[in-house]
Amino acid sequence: RDVFTELLSAILVSLRIGLIAGCIATAIGLTLGLVAGYVGGVVDNIITFVTNLFTVIPGFVMLILIANSISASSRGVVLVAVIIGLPAHPWTCRSVRSQVISLRNRDHVNISKLSGHSMVRVITCDILPYVASYVVMALILQISSGILAEAQLSMLGLGPATTEYATLGLMMNWATIFTAHTQGAWWAFFPVIFSIALISFSLNLMNTGLDQVFNPQLR
């Protein structure tokens, strides 16, 4: 088969999975972190407790349990991305929460409260812009983690159950099934490994560059 064409298609599908999973994880973590940090009290304790539960349980083990509980015929690209994204929100939530706690008592936030603005408006207009740069960097890291998680699940046979299109993880799984590594067929698995490493390195390099842009102290 044409491995190069298959690889190009697999990269596109894996990036799609990473993007969906990253958006889901970042959206959940951002929402919970904003609410917990701003409201505080009982709400903060409940959200922190739930987040700690996800933190204590090993993330990859949780992915295996969730993916294994779903029938193979139902595991498509979008569903696998959702499975990866849902448990990946805790560290984003904890980081956003800590930043919001340091912002909620600033003068401009107190003035907005005294002006009678609603909680939603205070959070979206007076707090969210200050954490937006961090959210962008968190999204990039979540995309990278989503791509790696899909590759790990697919290697175990728990990724998208399809032969109509490939992902980077599925290509590794197929190479293992057909014993490409023992037959010396390096072209079946080495380009996939190199692509995964290159994508992860590129996304982390992008994150470092954005950190230098948003943080003047690092310039």
Image (cartoon, grey):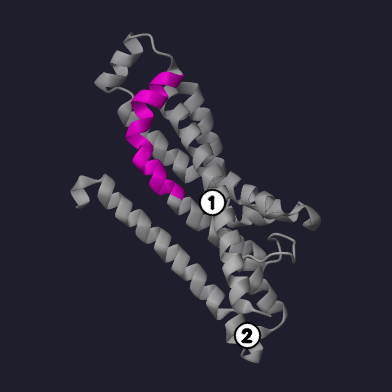
Please rate how many residues cluster around mark 2, counting C-alpha atoms within 10 Å: few if below 14, some from 14 to 19, many from 20: some
Which stretch did the figure color magenta?
120-139
Q: Quadrant of residue 206?
A: bottom left
Looking at the image, residue 38 lies above or below residue 178: above
The residue at which mark 2 appears reads as 181
Badge 1 marks a residue whose secondary structure is: helix
Q: Is residue 216 left or right of residue 137?
A: left
Q: Is residue 1 left or right of residue 109?
A: right
Question: Which residue is the extreme one toward the bottom?
Answer: 183
- Asked whether residue 132 is drawn in magenta, I would say yes
Q: Separation of disc 1 and disc 2 at Cα? A: 30 Å
Residue 218 is situated, as x and y percent measured from the top left of the image, at 21, 52
Prevailing secondary structure class for the magenta stretch in the rendered image:
helix
Q: Is residue 89 visible?
A: no
Q: Residue at x 46, y 65 (%)?
A: 199
Q: Residue at x 31, y 30 (%)?
A: 102
Q: Is residue 131 left or right of residue 46?
A: left
Residue 98 is situated, as x and y percent measured from the top left of the image, at 37, 35
The disc label shown at residue 19, or none: 1
